[in-house]
Amino acid sequence: RRQQGVGVGAAPPSPLRVLLVDNYDSFTYNLYQTLARLCGGARPVVVTNDTPWSEVEPILRAVDAVVIGPGPGHPAVASDFGVGARILDEARAKECEGSEAPVLGVCLGHQGMATALGG
């Protein structure tokens, strides 16, 4: 027996909208390709870690998830991690309100998440 809303005639699920933060690492392109495939063909929105917050904030409000990518350096160094730190601060604030977008960190992004949580 088919579940209601699944199968012939059911609307396809909406593609997942993802923000991908590029910390100037060539692996980010691989993440981009993989995310596009996994997210129903929707291309992730890519911002570099030095993109002004005024440009990132409206994008952050419009996405379903965030991936903070790999890069050189240390997450505690502002020039290495850039806007990633502010995104994590915003994500934690939204989590307290109960309406956060999930965040995935890869390499430097993961280290940044640990640093933001006091690790």
Image (cartoon, rainbow, N blue to C red):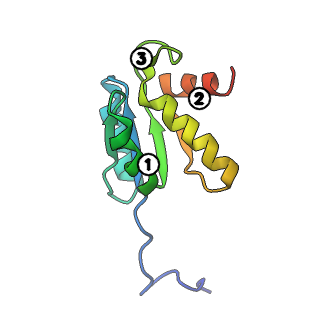
Looking at the rendering, in which quadrant would you find the N terminus? bottom right
Q: CA distance from mark 3 to mark 1?
A: 20 Å
Q: Which mark is residue 80?
A: 3
Residue bearing the label numbered 2? 113
Q: Could you tell me the amino acid type at mark 1?
A: Leu
Q: Residue at x 57, y 36 (%)?
A: 89
Q: Residues within 10 Å of mark 1 (few under 14, many from 20)?
A: many
Residue bearing the label numbered 1? 60
Q: Could you tell me the amino acid type at mark 3?
A: Asp
Mark with earlier residue (3, 2): 3
Q: Is residue 98 left or right of residue 22?
A: right
Q: Quadrant of residue 57?
A: top left
- Where residue 25 sits: x, y (%)? 33, 23
In the image, residue 4 sits, relative to residue 97, either above or below, namely: below
Q: Residues within 10 Å of mark 3 (few under 14, many from 20)?
A: some
> Does the CB distance between marks 2 and 1 fall below 8 Å?
no
Q: Residue at x 60, y 83 (%)?
A: 3
Q: Could you tell me the amino acid type at mark 2?
A: Met
- Residue that protrudes farthest toward the front in the picture: 54
Q: Residue at x 37, y 28 (%)?
A: 49
